[in-house]
Amino acid sequence: MDPLVVPVPSLVLLIGPSGSGKSTWAARHFGPYEVVSSDRCRAMIADSEADQSVTPAAFELVRFIAARRLEAGRLAVVDATNVHAAARRHNLDLAAACGVPAVAIVLDLPVERMLANNAGRAGRVVDDEVVRRQRRDLDEALGVLGSEGYAAVHVLDEATIDAVTIERVQEP
């Protein structure tokens, strides 16, 4: 499989339901300071990744950190479900405001694998119905991602998710 080309700087948007392995995958392919996690930002505010009451503030923090990284000419990888168009639009607008491309990386796995991953989490486990709903939302998103304005959309499935590598290309 050819490497996924990621321009630097750029905003990389991870897209996938809870349990799809976004955080684990991101940790294998990107540096710890490059990944801006909504769960981590939620915990920074409320001492818990599970405290949904601070979600709006957590996403303000995600976008703030991502913007500062992009303005510094760095890579910013947004680790959140991003299965809803409105969430993706906020990130696309951020990339445009910073004058950098946005790249979508979709983790498109069967719902059974996501449910198993979710059940095996050490810590916050999401309700199965939430995972199923996010999977349906992802199915809808897959039909429109190509028209949303990304420089590239990469869809990883069970056959490719573990084999893929990242190639960083410095933008002028």
Image (spheres, rainbow, N blue to C red):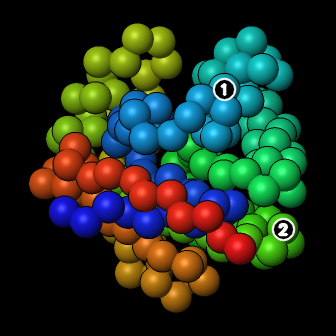
Where the N terminus falls, by quadrant?
A: bottom left
- Give the percent coordinates (x, y) of residue 40: 66, 26
Farthest-out residue, bottom: 147
Residue topped by disc 1? 40
- Give the percent coordinates (x, y) of residue 157: 22, 57
Farthest-out residue, left: 159
Which disc number belongs to residue 94?
Answer: none
Relative depth, front residue between 171 and 69: 171
Q: Is residue 80 left or right of residue 45?
A: left
Relative depth, front residue between 7 and 84: 7
Instruction: Determine contact: label 2, label 1, CB under 8 Å.
Output: no
Q: Residues within 10 Å of mark 1 (few under 14, many from 20)?
A: some
Residue depicted at 69% across the width and 61% down the height: 9
- Give the percent coordinates (x, y) of residue 13: 56, 57
What's the residue type where badge 2 is placed? Answer: Cys
Residue topped by disc 2? 98
Residue depicted at 20% across the width and 39% down the height: 113
Where the C terminus falls, by quadrant?
A: bottom right
Q: Is residue 27 left or right of residue 118?
A: right
Q: Is residue 52 visible?
A: no
Disc 2 vs disc 1: which is toward the camera? 2
Q: Is residue 3 above or below residue 124?
A: below
Q: Is residue 164 above or below residue 104?
A: above
Work out how far the residue at label 2 is from the one at label 1, CA to CA, in angstroms: 23 Å
Per the image, label 1 sits on a secondary structure element best described as helix
Q: Residues within 10 Å of mark 2 (few under 14, many from 20)?
A: many
Per the image, label 2 sits on a secondary structure element best described as helix
Residue depicted at 55% across the width and 79% down the height: 151
